[in-house]
Image (tube, rainbow, N blue to C red):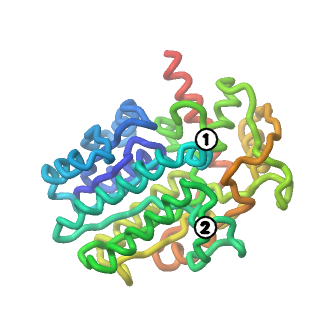
């Protein structure tokens, strides 16, 4: 079976590609390399002993997307990662996020509607819940007004897919609402290496630890949490990658109850920013240089998942600990610096 992975050289996408190749799927990756590099292909090849097909393509180019599908009509499933993902950046540049995250999804769906049957996994986010009234968060929690343009694009993205599924029964779709992916493949050959200043906590931690950044900024210590810092559900990226394969098999084997389903993907445990810092220090024996700064626009106090629906209905469960995820992130960071210096 041939699976299209959009944004497949990015952080999450590359790990999903590895899982798909290891499960003997044929994979074609499209990526515009706006937040990734072509070198990731070599890491995937080394891990899997084979490479996916690759095409450099910007999904904002409607004609190019149409041409791609004319040339690739044998696609059995699409996993859609190609989107901008930083909360802070989306507050500063909302139009970039609406163009990149909404237009690309619409163009993709327009092409999928031309196929006799199509399967789609949408990369969604726990940000659709905003600051939930009840923790842990279940899929039945109300979707609140978004705290950021990024969060809004995920809400609107899900609404678009739901609307299409209501009138197009040839489309089967699953939205996976991720909590906070961290870590890397156990080989340390692929991982999270954002271009420019990291927008997420763990790569900022590892870059600070290795001396690439002078100091880690912790955004706020006055939240009503165990230590005043924000709480999130940090999931190992390999657990997340496995969830995509499980969801894909659910689509392909026609196990869905309705043609659009949503699942939370997390560990079910919340960890504060300071707890992540202390766990990293324990795992590595290093002492991090950090400071507390003011809160960041768009951030919520706490978010962690109730994963019982994914566990019981989809048959998926996370297995890696926070410390294991941070150890893998550190291994990746060290390998990335060594490769750069050589």
Residue in the image at 13% along x and 49% along y: 71
Disc 2 marks which residue?
145
Front in this rendered view, residue 306 or 85 = 85
Residue in the image at 41% along x and 45% along y: 14
Badge 2 marks a residue whose secondary structure is: loop
**Rendered image quadrant of residue 92:** top right
**303 to the left or right of 112:** right
Front in this rendered view, residue 156 or 300 = 156
Residue in the image at 34% along x and 42% along y: 31
Query: Compared to 160, does 273 lie above or below?
Result: above
Badge 1 marks a residue whose secondary structure is: loop
Marks 2 and 1, Cα distance to the nearest angstrom? 22 Å
Disc 1 marks which residue?
199
**Rendered image quadrant of residue 175:** bottom left
Q: Return the x and y of residue 114 as percentages of the image width and height.
A: 18, 65
> Quarter holding the N terminus?
bottom left
Query: Compared to 199, does 228 lie above or below?
Result: below
Other-residue count near label 2 (Cα within 10 Å), few / some / many at <14 / 14–19 / ≥20: some
């Amino acid at each position: 079976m041939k699976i299209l992975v959009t944004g497949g050289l990015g952080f999450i996408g590359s790990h999903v590609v590895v899982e798909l190749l290891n499960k003997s799927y044929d994979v074609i990756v499209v990526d515009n390399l706006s937040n990734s590099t072509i070198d990731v292909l070599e890491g995937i090849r080394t891990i899997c002993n084979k490479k996916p097909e690759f095409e450099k393509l910007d999904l904002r180019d409607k004609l190019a997307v149409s041409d791609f599908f004319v040339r690739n009509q044998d696609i059995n499933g699409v996993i859609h990662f190609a989107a901008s993902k930083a909360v802070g950046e989306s507050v500063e540049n909302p139009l970039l996020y609406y163009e990149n995250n909404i237009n690309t999804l619409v163009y993709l769906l327009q092409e999928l509607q031309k196929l006799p049957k199509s399967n789609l996994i949408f990369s969604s986010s726990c940000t659709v819940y905003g600051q939930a009234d009840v923790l842990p968060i279940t899929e039945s929690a109300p979707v609140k007004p978004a705290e950021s343009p990024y969060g809004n694009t995920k809400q609107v993205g899900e609404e678009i897919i739901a609307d299409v599924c209501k009138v197009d029964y040839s489309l089967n779709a699953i939205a996976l609402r991720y909590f906070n992916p961290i870590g890397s493949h156990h080989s340390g050959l692929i991982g999270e290496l954002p271009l420019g200043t990291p927008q997420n906590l763990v790569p900022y931690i590892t870059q600070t630890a290795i001396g690439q950044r002078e100091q880690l900024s912790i955004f706020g210590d006055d939240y009503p949490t165990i230590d005043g810092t924000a709480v999130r559900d940090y999931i190992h990226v390999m657990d997340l990658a496995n969830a995509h394969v499980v969801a894909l098999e659910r689509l392909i084997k026609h196990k869905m109850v309705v043609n659009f389903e949503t699942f939370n993907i997390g560990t079910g445990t919340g960890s504060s920013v300071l707890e992540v810092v202390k766990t990293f220090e324990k795992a590595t024996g290093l002492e991090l240089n950090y400071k507390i700064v003011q809160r960041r626009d768009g951030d919520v106090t706490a978010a962690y998942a109730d994963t019982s629906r994914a566990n019981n209905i989809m048959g998926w469960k996370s297995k890696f600990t926070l410390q294991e995820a941070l150890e893998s992130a550190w291994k990746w960071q060290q390998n990335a610096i060594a490769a750069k210096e050589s």
